[in-house]
Amino acid sequence: MILFSALATLGAGAGGCVPGERAALLDVKRGFTSDPDGVLSSWTGLRPDCCRWGGVVCDNATGRVVELRLRNALADGGSTGLSGEISPALLRLPRLAHLDLSHNSLSGSGVAPPPPLPRFLGSLSALRYLNLSSTDIAGEVPPQLGNLSRLVALDLSSLAGLYSGDLSWLAGLSKLEYLDMGFVNLNASVGWVRAVSMLPSLRVLSLPQCGLTTSPSSPANLTRLRKLDLSSNAINTSTVDAWFWNVPTLTYLDLSGNSLSSPFPDAIGNMTGLQVLNLDGNGMVGMIPATLQRLCSLQVLDVTVNQIGGDMSEFMDRLPRCALGNVLVLQLSAANISGRLPEWIGDMAQLKYLDLSFNNLVGEIPQGIGKLSKLTRLFLNKNSLDGSLSEAHFVNLVSLEWIDLSQNSMSMEIRPSWRPPCKLVYAYFPDVRMGPQFPAWIKHQPDIKYLDISHSGIVDTLPQWFWKSFSDAVYLNISVNQISGRLPSSLRFMNSSLAIYLGANNLTGSVPLLPEKLLVLDLSRNSLSGPIPSEFGAPELVELDVSSNRINGTVPASLCQFPNLLHLDVSNNDLTGHLPQCRNVSSDDLGLTTLILYNNNLSGEFPVFLKHCKAMTFLDLAQNMFSGIVPEWIGRKLPSLTHLRLRSNMFSGNIPTQLAELGDLQLLDLADNRISGSIPRSLGNMTGMTQEHPPLSLNPLTGYGASGNDRIVDSLPIVTKGQDRDYTSGVIYMVSLDLSDNVLSGEIPEELSALTGLVNLNLSRNHLNGTIPWNIGAIKKLESLDLSMNMLSGGIPSSLSDLTSLSHLNVSYNNLSGRIPQGNQLQSLANPAYIYIGNAGLCGPPLWKNCSSGGDDSVQQAPLHGDKSLSKIVFFYLGLGVGFVVGLWLVFFSLLFVKTWRFAYFQAIDMLYDVVYVFVAVRLSRRSAEESATS
Ligand SMILES: *[C@@H]1O[C@H](CO)[C@@H](O)[C@H](O)[C@H]1NC(C)=O
Ligand SMILES: *[C@@H]1O[C@H](CO)[C@@H](O)[C@H](O)[C@H]1NC(C)=O
Ligand SMILES: *[C@@H]1O[C@H](CO)[C@@H](O)[C@H](O)[C@H]1NC(C)=O
Ligand SMILES: *[C@@H]1O[C@H](CO)[C@@H](O)[C@H](O)[C@H]1NC(C)=O
Ligand SMILES: *[C@@H]1O[C@H](CO)[C@@H](O)[C@H](O)[C@H]1NC(C)=O
Ligand SMILES: *[C@@H]1O[C@H](CO)[C@@H](O)[C@H](O)[C@H]1NC(C)=O
């Protein structure tokens, strides 16, 4: 220590700093209340030469402080950096030309209120460089900043709490060459173009996400502007003559994420120096202009999510030929492009990223693509490409890391001995035919983090090397093949694994010990046996599907101990015994939204732990041996329930009137139990059944669900129209009330006819008496109505003929009498005689028995009132479980890229993996996200 300060003193002797400035710096230091990384630890009186303090730069000749470089270099690692205030003591450093405080969150991770931008900074008259980006500063930009007449660079980016309604202060910064105010709210700055026009030296202008709306066409005299970033604003200039099309000096133009729904202006061709052109997500209409040919420096072209709508070869022909050898990035995902990929795409020798996903491309992938030795990312997913991929397609793809060929009709024809020249990280081949043999070449791809070879026609055993080769994978999906073989008893070694989909194969063995970080596991539709282990080893598990196997034993109590578990499906197995009590959970502990137990041999009363599952939407206990009453508390404790299936158990007692409190319930199936009493009138109040729940494809963009994630929709049998049928993708919108096969008595409450959204109503095989409600015809959506095998009497209401969607009707074996109503759909039903059989008093067609005159005692129709409203379907999806989230995530994966490429390309390209990782993890589990940040 003594030696240390001696050295420091020695240093001060050689010139060193001015005492007054040293004192000023110490005051600056005092302004900061916290310095977690010790960046100011050298700022101490023990080291008098302040020119040697960390971050301080002095003029060699005069010893005056000219620069303070205090950027928080550890921000990426999560450090908040310096917090506290920017001290006015800075004014005592009159030569200060460079001030960088960026990435220090001055409010100290939000503990203190965000500090304002100090006015006195406007008096640092020597300042040439000022960087306060990402410092938490908030409030209005003080106009005093306009006094910094020597300022060359001003960075106020990533200060979302900052605003400037009037940019006239900019006029004072006549030397400004660099201006970045990204994320600062300039919403009200109508005159922003005029304001920046006063900056004749400007070379870089970055105003992304500033809430800018208009961009007047008045020319800006920005004759030196090279880089312009106006991305993610709401600029909707539909004129083609906006000023930014006409700045010939530009090399970088980013207008992505605006609403420029115009055609591409010819003037683009005037920017002959342009290297980067990003028009992603604007909805621009029509083919790129021929003038683009002039952009001989073009390296990056992004026209993702626009309505280009032409042919691929025409598009390619309009790319600048003079630049083809230099183009690095070509993105035209979701641009409505059709036609074939030209062979000469292989001439774009420098191409690194090629994204043509979500278009209408047809034909084979040309072999020319195999020449792209610099290509790292290739996305051709969601097109109509066909033909087969051969080794020739890959011959020179030595740099390829990310490939997505999903959702085409392609096959891969590759020798088992082929060694790919590339090292893939992201290998996404669902629906690409590769079978019947398991693709041997992936064995030599140890870097793969994401592998999807689902639905690829593999009929083979899972090779021994599989788990070893992919022990570092994050995401594995081999579902929907016919892959056989025995699962290892432990997958513990899969350290990075977040999601494993093995569903719909022919795997044997038992449920393995799971990787510690695992979030999603799908083992459904295999031939697994043995019990569900009492220890899973995946505490973060969010989704578990082991349905349709031969798993036996009981449901272990450990299932109560997954705080994040949303979706549990153990249906179609041989499970026995009572469900665990889950005693030690408080009401917030169980987030379960989906619990599917149907078709096992489970017994006991209605599970009491469900009282703690407030978020439950989909509950299926059907086809078990549950007994006891249907508890009243369902109505209060499970307020989000949309689907409740208890059919084919031994429940007894009454239907609780409180069920009507479930306002979202759209499917109630209590059939085939021993439920007695009458049908509560309150059921007519179930608003979830008064609404239509229109079919919604799994993904609005693609209609595609990642394999293994659409299984509820896939496989839940709904009994309607007198037969079990797979309501493929229908269960989501199925609105059904099934109380059949019980011992219900009393009348059918007229109130049920208020359930105008019902598609299926089944009250058959009970002891119901009285008449059929006269206004049953109000349930317009009804496709199936079964009232058979009761003791109903009276006539059949004529309103029945209003049910124009009806395709199945059964009123047989009652005591109905009178004339059978005619008309509409009733005429076209199959098995007409069978519908009415066993009712001695019915007459008229289709029965042979003629009616005596006037024997028609059916009731007149009541006026109808339509009742349509938006369904809660979206919420159902959101709550359905992470499978859906992950599924959607995968589908939107390439779109995610699109957004990250901008950054990835200009910063560290291979950060993307981490971005994606964080993205998933944040979605699924906060704790995993934290881990990823530190790893
Ligand atoms: C100060 O001197 C060092 C070497 O003595 C030199 O590298 C540096 O560029 C000089 N700085 C200024 C601002 O003149
Ligand atoms: C162009 O810049 C000059 C200052 O150099 C300014 O006086 C003039 O008003 C600007 N013109 C426009 C159209 O903004
Ligand atoms: C820009 O392009 C348009 C259309 O191609 C042309 O009419 C105009 O003269 C060009 N302007 C300049 C400054 O070159
Ligand atoms: C795999 O299982 C399916 C369905 O159980 C069956 O049809 C098929 O024959 C099985 N394939 C093999 C190779 O065992
Ligand atoms: C589960 O099934 C296996 C055979 O697959 C059998 O040996 C075992 O006894 C069964 N266990 C129970 C609890 O039924
Ligand atoms: C149905 O709801 C209405 C309004 O909430 C209420 O007044 C009525 O009593 C309910 N009907 C039954 C039978 O519970």
Image: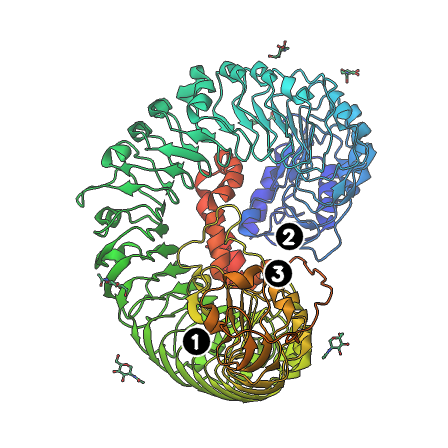
Q: Quadrant of the C terminus?
A: bottom left
- In the rendered image, residue 163, in percent from the top left (x then y), is placed at 77, 40
Q: Is residue 402 left or right of residue 658?
A: left
Taking the image as drawn, is residue 684 in sight? yes
Q: Point out residue 48 in the picture as x, y percentages from the top left corner.
A: 66, 42
Type of amino acid at the residue the image marks with label 3: Glu
**Mark 2–mark 1 contact, CB under 8 Å?**
no
Camera-near label (3 vs 2) is 3
Q: Which mark is residue 598?
A: 1
Instruction: Say above or below: 121 vs 836.
Output: above
Q: Quadrant of ligand 6?
A: bottom right
Q: Please count the marks in the image.
A: 3
Residue where numbered disc 3 is placed = 692
Q: How would you rate the neighbour count of disc 3 (Cα within 10 Å): few for under 14, some for 14-19, many for 20 or more?
A: many
* Amino acid at pointer 2: Asp
Q: Which mark is residue 35?
A: 2
Q: Earlier in the sequence, mark 3 or mark 1?
A: 1
Is 342 in front, or is 219? 342
> Circle 3 sits in a helix, a strand or a loop, which is it?
loop
The residue nearer to you, when weighing 61 against 414, is 414
Tell me how far mark 3 sits from mark 2, CA to CA.
Answer: 59 Å
- Confirm or reject: label 1 Cβ below 8 Å from ligand 4: no
Q: Quadrant of residue 823?
A: bottom right
Q: Nearer the viewer, residue 775 or 669?
A: 775
Q: How far apart are the two marked residues, 2 and 1, measured between alpha carbons?
A: 58 Å
Q: Position of residue 450 (x, y in %)?
A: 38, 50
Depicted 401 relative to depicted 61: above or below: below
